[in-house]
């Protein structure tokens, strides 16, 4: 079985034919490094979709389907999620021009990590760019959120079979939730920094404890591995709040294998509620997935950002895989707008408006296998003002060109 790896854009829902599957991969996203968070997630997710689509067909026995499901669950639990989670951390450093090494295989401490960064480099980043330093902690869970939201889109728009994605989907949901729930109880003391040489240490240690401590006390003594016992009473209360807020992630029909709701003969709908982290705190998001006349697939969303004491509103709309001219062209677009705390600060009441635009246009250049398979060249651009968009590489004003290709398979 040949393995083809491609990528499908994260912010866009419209499709021309529910029987077409698109596997899209951007080999360039505006910088000379590989990979951005978006590229890593799409590479993993579309590999799983392609392989799963090959083995989950009507000719397989129930035993063979269970073997696939068990194998994918084990892969995701032992390696798959660790790869994309750690790549999320590493991508923040790459965007900042800081070299690092992702090590998703569990080490002697049973920990996956990103290494190769000195204490002095991390201290300089904290003291000069606290928002990116906080994002360095949260980027792994940000990547988990973005990956699962893409899976929701494939499932809710009937672009992928439930049996293909569900083992990966549910394992990632449970793995992410367990991480958040560590905020609710004290574990026995973990790894000590002196157990490893400086360049072999994980860049941040426990993502959540480190994030919380540095948000509340950014100028305190530097060390990487924060334990729950290192947090103050106020910080532990904030940690518990995050743990309870994470239960919003279970308000999602795809967990319970509910696929769609028919609002009318021409409109199918689904929804999800997500919780994740931002460089200044966290957010809750409400998504609606609308399929209109079997062709137009639209994902409007509303989001509430939170810093220490204040709420900031955001929203946007994603248009996904819209084809026209008999499938010769494929269009993906999105718009995001937000109010976020000024300078992305944890304690700032003052908000600042921002927005982001992204559009990618693909042109078909090849058909084969009696027109059941097609290839597209993909060209796009994105622009954002200062601010945070999940999975977007930079927190600063940013413009970049996207290049890639798309494989389409008609089933």
Image (spheres, grey):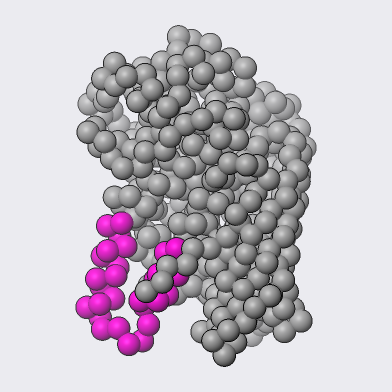
Main SS, magenta residues: helix
Going 64% across and 59% down the picture, which residue do you hit?
404
Q: Locate residue 299, reporting x and y percent.
A: 64, 62
* Magenta-colored stretch includes residue 313: no
Going 29% across and 16% down the picture, which residue do you hit?
194
Q: Locate residue 314, reporting x and y percent.
A: 69, 45
On the rendered structure, is 69 left or right of 213? left
Q: Quadrant of residue 113?
A: top left
Name the foreground residue: 133 vs 185. Answer: 133
Name the foreground residue: 285 vs 59. Answer: 59
Q: Quadrant of residue 282?
A: top right
On the rendered structure, is 61 left or right of 165? left
Q: Locate residue 97, reporting x and y percent.
A: 59, 30
Above or below residue 283? Residue 115 is above
Going 30% across and 83% down the picture, which residue do you hit?
60
Region rendered in magenta: 47-75
Name the foreground residue: 332 vs 257. Answer: 332
Above or below residue 52? Residue 231 is above
* Magenta-colored stretch includes residue 59: yes
Q: Locate residue 353, reporting x and y percent.
A: 77, 37
Q: Quadrant of residue 118?
A: top left
Going 64% across and 78% down the picture, which residue do you hit?
366
- Could one spot residue 220 in this view of the protein? yes
On the rendered structure, is 24 left or right of 235? right
Quarter holding the N terminus?
bottom left
- Could one spot residue 181 in this view of the protein? no
């Amino acid at each position: 079985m040949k393995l083809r790896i491609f990528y499908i854009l994260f912010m866009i829902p419209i499709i021309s034919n529910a029987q077409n599957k698109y596997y899209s991969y951007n080999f360039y996203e505006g910088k000379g490094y590989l990979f951005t968070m978006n590229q890593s997630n799409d590479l993993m997710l579309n590999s799983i979709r392609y392989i799963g689509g090959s083995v989950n067909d009507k000719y397989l026995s129930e035993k063979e389907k269970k073997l696939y499901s068990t194998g994918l669950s084990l892969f995701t639990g032992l390696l798959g999620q660790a790869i994309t989670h750690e790549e999320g951390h590493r991508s923040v450093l790459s965007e900042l021009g800081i070299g690092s090494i992702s090590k998703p295989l569990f080490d002697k401490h049973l920990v996956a990590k990103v290494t190769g960064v000195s204490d002095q480099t991390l201290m300089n980043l904290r003291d000069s760019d606290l928002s990116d330093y906080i994002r360095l902690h949260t980027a792994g869970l940000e990547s988990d959120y973005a990956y699962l939201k893409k899976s929701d889109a494939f499932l809710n728009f009937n672009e992928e079979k439930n049996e293909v994605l569900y083992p990966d989907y549910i394992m990632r949901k449970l793995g992410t939730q367990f991480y958040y729930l560590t905020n609710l109880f004290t574990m026995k003391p973990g790894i000590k920094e002196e157990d490893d040489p400086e360049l072999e240490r994980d860049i941040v240690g426990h993502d959540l404890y480190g994030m919380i401590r540095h948000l509340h006390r950014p100028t305190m003594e530097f060390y990487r591995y924060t334990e729950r016992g290192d947090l103050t009473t106020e910080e532990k209360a904030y940690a518990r709040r995050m743990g309870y807020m994470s239960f919003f992630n279970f308000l999602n029909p795809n967990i319970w294998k509910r696929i769609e709701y028919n609002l009318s003969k021409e409109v199918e709908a689904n929804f999800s509620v997500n919780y994740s982290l931002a460089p200044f705190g966290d957010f809750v998001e409400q998504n609606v997935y609308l399929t209109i006349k079997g062709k137009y697939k639209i994902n409007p969303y509303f989001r509430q950002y939170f810093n220490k004491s204040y709420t900031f509103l955001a929203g946007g709309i994603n248009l996904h895989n819209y084809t026209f001219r008999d499938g010769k062209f494929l269009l993906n677009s999105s718009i995001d707008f937000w109010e976020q705390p000024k300078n992305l600060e944890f304690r700032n009441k003052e908000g600042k408006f921002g927005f982001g635009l992204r559009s990618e246009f693909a042109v078909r250049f090849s058909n084969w296998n009696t027109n059941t398979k097609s290839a597209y060249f993909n060209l796009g651009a994105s622009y954002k003002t200062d601010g945070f968009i999940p999975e977007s590489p930079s927190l600063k004003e940013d413009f970049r060109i996207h290049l890639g290709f798309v494989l389409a398979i008609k089933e």
